[in-house]
Image (cartoon, rainbow, N blue to C red):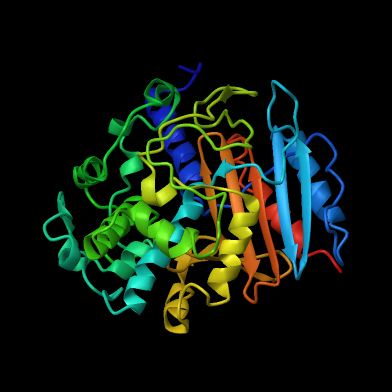
């Protein structure tokens, strides 16, 4: 136990860490130490402010930073620091990495595709599709809609906050290989009271997307992973994107991921690249690449994955702190007033952010192979400001 801190204080800190790492809605901070590599396919922008923000991130403690920008038909890649502390190799444009809660946008698309097909309505109750499953300690699926799951206004308890999952603090290192089923995760959520009444306010909960995936499976008769591949990954040729299930390793090429915040250790922390992601599933399990994420959000916002009616629903927002929450999609605003759409993901040893202008001309994905900057809460947003607010 840290000197001078009571158990109650440590518990509060641990909960704050988990929220910062897994809600994926707060701003981020990055930090490169080595100079960014030369631009690849540089277009009308020099990206000098972006490079400077990356190098600040490394100085602040990030082992490595990868940024990939699509600007019209041009592509720019910048890297800083190292992807692997042991070998010293830099990040590579084709590296695979965990994307955390960026997964939620994919899950929301599946649900809205089913609505477009007339197989559900986002105003259906959860009870209609999962009868009797959302009950206990004040939860009532008869009062919660699918829409409220997707925009985090259901009030359902966030199962990842429960100590039973061993997801908070150094104890997680003893449970890296635990396997959780969706039913077990839901039972954990139902064992605690709701965080708010349905529709009352925005309260981020990974249980919302656990339930959304269960609804997809109930309606389609296929697994969440099968529908994800059939409906999104294969049609868009996202060759670097996968749903790992219980697989612990990352596809090659990939770097390493280092945790300080989650396991409450000083830098450089501990290598947490391999772990069983089954506790995250449809709320945060996906593995992808920067190019795949840029391609996915371009297709989504350009209307290739959803009809306009569903895209309007997806981009209808509720207040969510400094940002606004749509259905699996977050609206952010840069310091210079540019509106961006996308999502952030954070977790054990990593942070990622993908954002795009509404017209999709200018898109950016960034990745840090550490969770150590999560509580500082500005680096990813600083990088977005640097990229989108620079003058042509």
The residue under the point 45% across, 32% down is 248
Can residue 105 be spotted in the picture?
Answer: no
Taking the view exactly as shown, the residue that stands out farthest to the left is: 132
Residue 290 lies left or right of residue 275; in this view the side is right
Q: How many marks on residues?
A: 0
Task: Choose between 149 and 98: the one closer to the eye.
Answer: 98
The answer to whether 50 is drawn above or below residue 347 in the figure is below
The image shows residue 25 at horizontal and vertical percentages of 51, 54
Task: Choose between 366 and 156: the one closer to the eye.
Answer: 366
Can residue 55 be spotted in the picture?
Answer: yes
Task: Choose between 103 and 4: the one closer to the eye.
Answer: 103
Where, by quadrant of the figure, is residue 47 drawn? bottom right
Residue 306 lies left or right of residue 181; in this view the side is right
The image shows residue 59 at horizontal and vertical percentages of 77, 35
Quarter holding the C terminus? bottom right
The image shows residue 345 at horizontal and vertical percentages of 53, 49
Residue 335 lies left or right of residue 128; in this view the side is right
């Amino acid at each position: 136990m840290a000197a001078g801190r009571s158990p109650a204080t440590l518990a509060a800190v641990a909960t704050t860490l988990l929220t910062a790492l897994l809600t994926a809605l707060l701003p981020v901070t990055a930090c490169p130490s080595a100079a960014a590599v030369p631009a690849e396919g540089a277009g009308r922008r020099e990206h000098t402010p972006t490079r400077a923000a990356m190098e600040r991130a490394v100085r602040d403690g990030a082992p490595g930073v990868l940024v990939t920008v699509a600007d019209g038909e041009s592509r720019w890649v910048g890297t800083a620091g190292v992807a692997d502390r042991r070998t010293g190799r830099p990040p590579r444009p084709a590296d695979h990495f965990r994307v955390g809660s960026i997964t939620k946008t994919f899950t929301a698309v599946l649900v809205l595709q089913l609505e477009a097909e007339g197989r559900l309505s986002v105003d259906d109750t959860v009870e209609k599709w999962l009868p009797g499953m959302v009950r206990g300690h004040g939860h009532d699926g008869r009062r919660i809609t699918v829409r409220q799951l997707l925009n985090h206004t259901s009030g359902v308890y966030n199962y990842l906050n429960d100590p039973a999952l061993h997801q908070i603090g150094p104890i997680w290192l003893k449970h890296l290989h635990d396997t959780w089923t969706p039913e077990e995760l839901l039972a954990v959520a139902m064992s605690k009271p709701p965080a708010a009444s349905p529709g009352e306010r925005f309260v981020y909960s990974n249980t919302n997307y656990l339930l959304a995936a269960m609804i997809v499976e109930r309606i389609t008769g296929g697994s969440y992973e099968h529908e994800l591949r059939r409906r999104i990954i294969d049609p868009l040729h996202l060759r670097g994107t996968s749903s790992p299930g219980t697989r612990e390793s990352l596809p090659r090429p990939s770097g390493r991921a280092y945790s300080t915040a989650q396991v409450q250790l000083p830098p450089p922390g501990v290598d947490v690249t391999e772990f069983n992601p089954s506790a995250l599933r449809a709320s945060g399990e996906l593995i992808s690449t920067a190019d795949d994420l840029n391609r996915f959000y371009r297709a989504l916002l350009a209307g290739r994955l959803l009809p306009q009616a569903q895209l309007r629903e997806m981009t209808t927002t509720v207040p969510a702190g400094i940002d606004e929450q749509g259905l699996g999609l977050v609206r952010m605003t840069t310091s210079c007033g540019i509106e961006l759409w996308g999502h952030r993901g954070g977790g054990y040893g990593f942070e990622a952010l993908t954002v795009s202008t509404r017209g999709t001309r200018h898109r950016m994905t960034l990745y840090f192979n550490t969770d150590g900057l999560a509580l500082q809460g500005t680096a990813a947003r600083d990088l977005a400001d640097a990229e989108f607010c620079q003058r042509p």
